[in-house]
């Protein structure tokens, strides 16, 4: 994303992968590992979208 090569589909895939890891992991560490990504998606979604809409040159 930071290189300007991501799409909305990539953002959706990131969310799906985090959800899958959280719900299929057998240990507490694996279940909590995606939490930082979920937090940034929740509170800083505009920044993700800005990187997708306006690639860095």
Image (cartoon, rainbow, N blue to C red):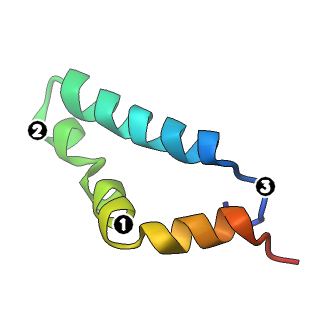
* Mark closer to the observer (2, 1): 1
Q: Secondary structure at mark 2?
A: helix
The answer to which of marks 3 and 2 sits earlier in the sequence is 3
Q: Quadrant of residue 49?
A: bottom right
Q: Is residue 33 above or below residue 52?
A: above
Q: Is residue 41 above or below residue 17?
A: below
Mark carried by residue 30 = none
Image quadrant containing the C terminus: bottom right
Disc 2 from disc 1: Cα separation:
20 Å
Marks 3,1: beta carbons within 8 A: no
In the shown orientation, is residue 22 left or right of residue 56?
A: left
Mark carried by residue 40 = 1
The answer to which of marks 2 and 1 sits earlier in the sequence is 2
Circle 3 Cα neighbour tier, 10 Å, few/some/many (<14 / 14–19 / ≥20): few
Disc 3 from disc 2: Cα separation:
33 Å
Q: Secondary structure at mark 1?
A: helix
Circle 1 Cα neighbour tier, 10 Å, few/some/many (<14 / 14–19 / ≥20): few
- Residue labelled with disc 2: 28
Mark carried by residue 5 = 3
The answer to which of marks 3 and 1 sits earlier in the sequence is 3
Q: Secondary structure at mark 3?
A: loop
Residue 25 location in percent, x, y? 22, 26
* Mark closer to the observer (3, 2): 3
**Closer to us: 9 or 37:** 9
Whether residue 10 can be seen here: yes
Circle 2 Cα neighbour tier, 10 Å, few/some/many (<14 / 14–19 / ≥20): few
**Closer to us: 38 or 52:** 52
- Measuring 41% from the left and 33% from the top, which residue is drawn there? 16
- Measuring 31% from the left and 71% from the top, which residue is drawn there? 43
Q: Is residue 30 above or below residue 6?
A: above
């Amino acid at each position: 994303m930071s290189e300007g090569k991501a799409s909305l589909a990539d953002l959706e895939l990131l969310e799906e992968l985090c959800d899958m890891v959280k719900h299929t992991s057998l240990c507490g560490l694996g279940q909590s590992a995606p939490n930082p990504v979920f937090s940034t998606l929740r509170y800083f979604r505009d920044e993700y979208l800005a990187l997708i809409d306006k690639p860095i040159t």
